[in-house]
């Protein structure tokens, strides 16, 4: 468990100066926990009911089914603007989509199909009481709740994306990544936060979190140096830095 001595994100950043990583402060942990526990409505098309979904719940449901199907999940991360919001609330950027990355072993078409089936099956868990689930097919769920699906599977890239619809634009983006070639990285969008320790805390701890009792949570800048990326994120008037990434990288 982490105790934040100075209560500032800057202090945590300096501890790992020159590194791609930073330990989240208590204030940042609280923002992260709020994002994962706030309910996000997934709106159905036509007469399909709205699904009331907490990000923490969908992560748990998807991961447990992946474990059952023996698809190894290395870790789960928050990415993009939501991660930037956690790390730097005053950036003025806010966040739109909720990007969740499952870093997993996806070696062929079979695993990609299994992941797709798992996500659609998980949607049944969030249907309101009284809905007859037996007559709802995976294709029906896809048409009702999925905004888009993307799959890339070649020598350097193996990943898929399933985006769940939200009428206000805050889609829940579930990304399953084995490897990903990043051509350019915008520094303000390059932050990833590893969620496993926080998810495990809520599974195992009988006591609530506090400033002196909370899991150690790591933020990573895939742009490179965390401090440099942070500076760009925190400077509203500056243009976002970019960096070419020529190699393939697993998460």
Image: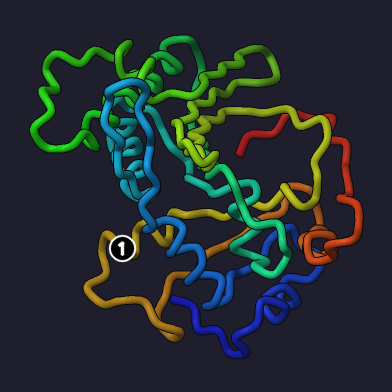
The color scheme shown is rainbow
Q: Position of residue 48 (x, y in %)?
A: 28, 25
Is 6 above or below relative to 100? below
Q: Is residue 102 visible?
A: no
For the residue pair 15 and 27, the one nearer the viewer reads as 27
Is 18 left, or right, of 53 in this rendering?
Answer: right
Instruction: Indicate the quadrant where residue 185 lies.
Output: top right
Residue in the image at 46% along x and 58% along y: 35
Instruction: Indicate the quadrant where residue 11 lies.
Output: bottom right
Residue in the image at 60% along x and 21% along y: 158
User: What crowding class fits label 1: few (fewer than 14 Cα within 10 Å), some (14-19), or many (20 or more)?
Assistant: some
Is 176 left, or right, of 180 in this rendering?
Answer: left
Q: Position of residue 117 (x, y in %)?
A: 33, 18
Residue in the image at 56% along x and 71% along y: 28
Q: Is residue 124 visible?
A: yes
The total number of labels drawn is 1
Is 251 left, or right, of 214 in this rendering?
Answer: right
Q: Position of residue 76 (x, y in %)?
A: 48, 45
Residue in the image at 49% along x and 78% along y: 2
Q: Secondary structure at mark 1?
A: helix
Can you name the residue that lies furthest to the bottom here?
6
Is 76 above or below relative to 153? below
Q: Position of residue 54 (x, y in %)?
A: 35, 49
Quadrant of the snapshot with the N terminus: bottom left
The residue carrying mark 1 is 202
Quadrant of the snapshot with the C terminus: top right
């Amino acid at each position: 468990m982490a105790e934040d001595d100075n209560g500032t994100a800057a202090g945590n950043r300096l501890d790992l100066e020159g590194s791609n990583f930073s330990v989240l402060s208590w204030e940042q942990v609280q923002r992260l926990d709020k994002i994962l526990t706030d309910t996000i409505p997934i709106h159905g098309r036509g007469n399909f009911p709205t699904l009331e979904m907490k990000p923490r719940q969908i992560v748990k449901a998807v991961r447990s089914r992946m474990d059952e199907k023996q698809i190894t999940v290395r870790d789960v991360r928050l990415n993009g603007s939501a991660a930037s919001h956690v790390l730097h609330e005053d950036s003025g950027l806010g966040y739109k989509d909720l990007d969740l990355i499952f870093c997993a072993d996806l070696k062929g078409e079979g695993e990609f199909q299994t992941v797709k089936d798992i996500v659609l099956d998980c949607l049944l868990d969030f249907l309101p009481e009284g809905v007859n689930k037996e007559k709802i097919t995976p294709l029906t769920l896809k048409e009702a709740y999925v905004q888009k699906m993307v799959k890339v599977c070649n020598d350097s890239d193996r990943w898929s994306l399933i985006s769940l619809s939200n009428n206000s634009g805050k889609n829940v983006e579930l990304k399953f990544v084995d490897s990903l070639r990043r051509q350019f990285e915008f520094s303000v969008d390059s932050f990833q936060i590893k969620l496993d320790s926080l998810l495990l805390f809520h599974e195992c701890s009988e006591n609530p979190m506090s400033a002196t009792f909370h899991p150690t949570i790591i933020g990573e800048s895939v742009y490179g140096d965390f401090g440099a990326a942070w500076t760009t994120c925190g400077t509203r008037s500056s243009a976002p830095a970019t960096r070419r990434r020529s190699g393939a990288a697993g998460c």
